[in-house]
Amino acid sequence: MSKNSRIEYLLSIKKRYNSSSKLEKKSILDEFCKTCGYNRKYSIRILNAKPRKQKKKKLGRQKKYEGEEFKGFLIKTWKASNLPCGKRLEPIIKIWLPKYIESGEKLTTETIEKLNDISASTIDRIFKPIRHRYKKRGLCTTKPGSILKELIPIRTNQ
């Protein structure tokens, strides 16, 4: 018996079980245990259980910095400025935003206000899930190894 069919069967028997006498409950319980394969004590618990409440709505503030247009500008600016951290990207946004609008790109006034109000830590929080996908350009590719070891004089006891 599948889980869904067990739940349907439970709901149909539950009404009958709760409104019956002690002798009738015994026969209903025997039938339920035999059909579903549940332990007797477990069957009693689920037949007497109160209906579960629906999940509560997520507590806390609603997300302020959301939207395709907002994140699109933020990611485009972040990539163009070589993936800086939030502290460095915050002033860049304020400098680049007027130039972006002058170039003909359209942003709503709500998005412009959000971009002017955003803090460095919020920028870092937004980029946390996507930061690992990108690598910076122009970093030194020299790796420490045997070349550096040969250049550094070290005394040994020989």
Image (spheres, rainbow, N blue to C red):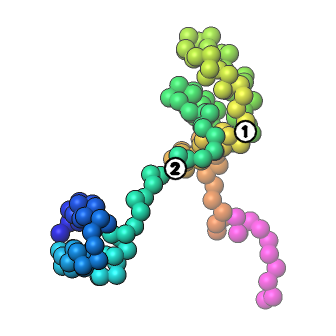
**Side (left or right) of 135 relative to 17:** right
Give the residue number, with chain letter if any, for mark 2. 56
**Side (left or right) of 36 relative to 91:** left
Callout 1 amino acid:
Ala
Marks 2 and 1, Cα distance to the nearest angstrom?
Answer: 31 Å
Quadrant in which the C terminus is drawn: bottom right
> Element type at marker 1?
helix
Measured as percent of width and height from the top left, residue 152 is found at: 77, 68
Specify the segment rendered in magenta: 148-158
Q: Nearer the viewer, residue 7 or 149?
A: 7
Would residue 119 be counted in the magenta stretch?
no
> Element type at marker 2?
loop
Neighbours of disc 1 within 10 Å: few (<14), some (14-19), many (20+): some
Q: Nearer the viewer, residue 104 or 81?
A: 104
Neighbours of disc 2 within 10 Å: few (<14), some (14-19), many (20+): few
Which residue of the protein is positioned furthest toward the bottom in this rendering? 158
Residue at left offset 45%, top offset 54%: 53
Could one spot residue 141 in this view of the protein? yes
Measured as percent of width and height from the top left, residue 14 is found at: 28, 64
Kindly indicate the quadrant of the structure image that contains residue 99: top right
Callout 2 amino acid:
Lys
Q: Nearer the viewer, residue 151 or 134?
A: 134
Residue at left offset 64%, top offset 68%: 146
Residue at left offset 61%, top offset 33%: 65
Q: Nearer the viewer, residue 119 or 48?
A: 48
Could one spot residue 92 in this view of the protein? no
Residue at left offset 60%, top offset 38%: 62
Give the residue number, with chain letter if any, for mark 1. 120
Query: Looking at the image, is 90 positioned above or below residue 39?
Result: above
Kindly indicate the quadrant of the structure image that contains residue 110: top right
Measured as percent of width and height from the top left, residue 73 is found at: 57, 27
**Side (left or right) of 8 relative to 48:** left
